[in-house]
Amino acid sequence: MTDSIHDSRLQVGDTVTVHMPLGHNKRGVWGISVLYTTSPEAKFDGAVGKIVEINPEGPYTIPLYLVDFRDSGNKAAIPWQAQWFREEWLEPVKEKTRA
């Protein structure tokens, strides 16, 4: 059995932004895929946070990342301060270069 967490591109302490899968709804409007619109994770789409914990065994052996959104400067209101996400829903935030 291979340890999938070692193949991860994300580590504890990384700053990430949440990007849920996109798709069209019945009216043809582009947005969060209808498969995920009712999931709690969809409320965090676009939010920036920091990874504080990794569960490599997660449900169904899918690794999960606990993202903390406190003190991240999010302008949109988020429903609670931390949430578990799959790796494919997280994008690393590039650090700003100073001039």
Image (cartoon, rainbow, N blue to C red):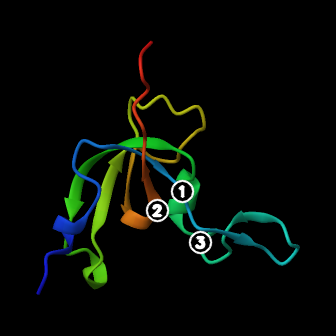
Q: Given this view, does label 3 or label 1 mark the residue nearer the observer?
A: 1
Give the labeled residue for mark 1.
19
Give the labeled residue for mark 3.
36
Residue 25, relative to residue 84: is it above or below? below
The earlier-in-sequence mark between 2 and 1 is: 1
Q: 78 or 50: which is nearer to us?
A: 50
> Residue at image x 78%, y 74%?
25
> Residue at image x 86%, y 72%?
28
**Farthest-out residue, right:** 27
Q: 41 or 93: which is nearer to us?
A: 93
* Residue type pointed to by label 1: His
Q: In the rendered view, does 29 fall on the left or right side of 51?
A: right
Q: In the rendered view, does 59 fall on the left or right side of 94?
A: left
Residue 74, relative to residue 47: is it above or below? above
Are circles 2 and 1 on residues that touch, CB within 8 Å? Answer: yes
Q: Position of residue 54 (x, y in %)?
A: 22, 59
What is the secondary structure assignment of the residue under circle 2?
helix
The earlier-in-sequence mark between 3 and 1 is: 1
* Residue type pointed to by label 2: Trp
The quarter holding residue 63 reads bottom left
What is the secondary structure assignment of the residue under circle 1?
loop
Give the labeled residue for mark 2.
89
Q: Position of residue 55 (x, y in %)?
A: 21, 65
Q: Given this view, does label 2 or label 3 mark the residue nearer the observer?
A: 2
Q: Position of residue 80 (x, y in %)?
A: 45, 47
> Residue at image x 42%, y 32%?
72
